[in-house]
Amino acid sequence: MDVTRKVLCGQDLFNPVLAMGLQASLLLSVSHLLQIAVKSIGIPTPIPQITAGLLIGHSLLSKIKPLEKYFIQTNSADYYNVLAFFGRTCVVFLIGLELDIAYMKRHLRGASIIALAASVPCIISSAAISFFMFQFFMGKHESFAAFMFIFMLSIVNSASPLVIRFIAELKLGTSNFGRLAVCSSLLNDITCILCGGLLMKTVEDGKFRFGEWIWSLLFTAIVSLVVRRVALLLNKCSPEAQYLKNTQIIPLFLFVLLSASFVDRWGAANSLLTALVLGVTFPRQGKTARTMMHKLSYAVYTFVLPIYFGYTGFQANFADAVILKNFVAAAVIVTVSIGGKILGTLIACQRLKIPLKEGVVLGLLLNLKGHFDVMILGAVRLKIDWNSSFVEVMLMTAILNTLISGIAVAFIVLKDTGTFSYKPVTLEQQNPDTELRVLACVHGPRNVPTMVKVIGWLSWSKNLPICAYLMHLVELLPKKRSSKMYHQLEDDELSDDDTYGGNDAVEINNGVDAFVLETNIFIRQMKVVSSISCMFEDVCDVAEDVRASLIILPFHKHQRIDGKMESSKDGIRTTNQRVLRHAPCTVAILVDRGLIGSSGLKTMPHVASLFFGGPDDREALSLSTYIAMHLGMNLTVMRFLKASTRSGQERINVSSQGNDQVLMAMPSRGAEDEADNAFLEDFYNKYVTSGQVGYIEKHVNNGAQTAVALRDIVDMYHLFIVGNGGRRNSTVTNGMSDWEECPELGNVGDLLASSEFDPNCSVLIVQQYKPPLD
């Protein structure tokens, strides 16, 4: 970078650096105060951060002479541009690290249609008015083609960092709508950065150098391979630690920054594309990625983004808006930008069958600007002697577009909670072809192997991977009082690792990393530190934030060496009971006795789904559907019927292909059984007739015979899936409650979880989500 060289070679570094420090401190302080002021009305933080930049920038405080001499130093623009460059690189690299690549692959077509459709009206309208803008601001000696191209790019561009922050602030990051908006904005931003970088290099050098472009791409590919290899090697370092040391991770990050600046200075590609590629190709598994995201996200979200967004507002000078020509031009550009984005997005959403209101919000989100505009217009100001009024007007319109669109998005999303809020759907109503979102909870490393193996069994297709979260629940213990002085305490008494699950976290991370390496199923890890009395609230809140379809909780008992079940902390059972009552989605409790076989091994696990009837059993069978479609699994559905109904059964047609009919016996009973029969018919037609799933009927008279039947088959299966049955009154389970220990598991689940059963059989007890009564 030429600017970097000027800064490093400058003779007077103190005053500009002091000015930057003062500006950054004031930006952080003012933006924080504004965030507090607008927090109650739900305005996302980028809005007050940009507003803070406007307040202390050229439009207001910097017009005061005593302040101007501190903020606006000689060559201060060079220093600000260097700071902005490294800030942009950090932000884009973190975006690449956090990007949901699997979702983007699956929805690349839809995101491309939206990005293209939102850009076409803006391109047409901006091309139509570019001649008039050229007459307004430019002289005859400037290039009209270059002006029109930059003008169109500024209107078409969507600032992906702003879109991502808005989506995260509005808690839409885990929704299909939010992820589609992020993917569309990224595609738009990448295209504009690519085209803008090529244009600026061509204008600067006088011709397009194809060789430099190829060299830049090759260099980026080589660096990404090197970074990936180093990251994988670092995963093997410090096996006893949860994170890498600063001395291990900082050199790798500095190498990323230097590689991006190297491409920007000597290559033909843009440094932001290099940073994004390095972030996307960075290995997700292991402690290297975990440490990089942990260190970088705190710095970026706490310091870099507020300063970066604030600097965007600092650049604009709204004092020029009093000039009639500038005011008219700004109004026209803002109208064209907002109208074009909304119009094009609505056309795309109609094709993709996206609701109208979501289309409007999506168009407004794609109209957020600032990221690309500051970069390309700053380059224009440095490299091309254009009219400064045009640059000021374009910066002004970028801020206006962001403020107007951002406030409108916040207002619509917060007002219409029915469209954008989390709407839980039972697994029975959910299409198996859609993404299954699972929140698995563990209290320690003991349950991790079985928990992740269940997640692997539910991930039946590489084309539609499961979205899984593993949350470490850590009990917040009260601090112990000590009569010792601080210097008298031992090292282990000074450490909070044991108190906040530090040692357990290492084993949990190692278990998850080994699973991810074996199966390529990515699991996002989280940790919650809370008191037992409030832990269920954290579980329910996180499930709502990640829009989970299923919560899996560990049973409060664990298996001893002799195979008997022994109770753990009583607080675990209390948490499970409260989650079952208050969960915003379906809940399953996992009785862990170890699981044989895995998705990545040749052993074919045998799973039995027990069906007695009722909503919970239908939910359990719906969950079994994901296992049924797994090629490496062996699933058997076992239905228990009352023996006295054998002679009075109805024969129901469950499949018809030409003249061949497959009949399955169905008892004729009440309205609840009609729902069970209809559900089983559909399941039978889809999976049993094709040979994917086995089907067995057991005829019993009461709970005692049911218990005997279960004991006869318990050693044949590795995992039982059964409904809780809390809302079911079945004659085949009558009497089983006489010896139950844990009513929250239901009659059958409690029996299977007891110490009387096979020590090698795990159980998953499912409770269907029931919407609260209004």
Image: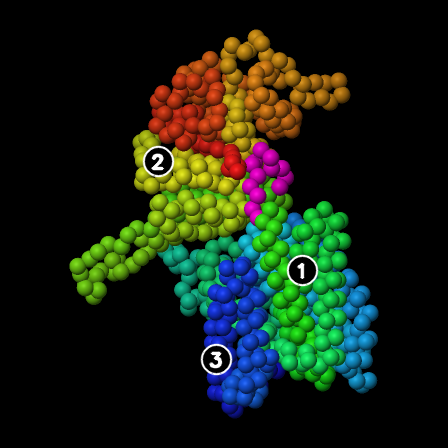
Front residue of 509/180: it is 180
Q: Residues within 10 Å of mark 1 (few under 14, many from 20)?
A: many
| Segment colored magenta | 421-434
Q: Residue 725: percent from the left, percent from the top? A: 47, 27
The N terminus: image quadrant? bottom right
Q: Secondary structure at mark 3?
A: helix
> Mark 2 and mark 1: span between their CA atoms?
51 Å
> Mark 1 and mark 3: span between their CA atoms?
34 Å
Q: Which residue is mark 3?
A: 21
Q: Residues within 10 Å of mark 2 (few under 14, many from 20)?
A: some
- The residue sitting at 62% across, 48% down in the picture is 419
Q: Which residue is mark 1?
A: 364
- The residue sitting at 54% across, 68% down in the picture is 48
**Amino acid bearing label 1:** Leu
Closest to the camera, between mark 3 and mark 2, is 3
**Amino acid bearing label 2:** Lys
> Mark 3 and mark 2: span between their CA atoms?
56 Å
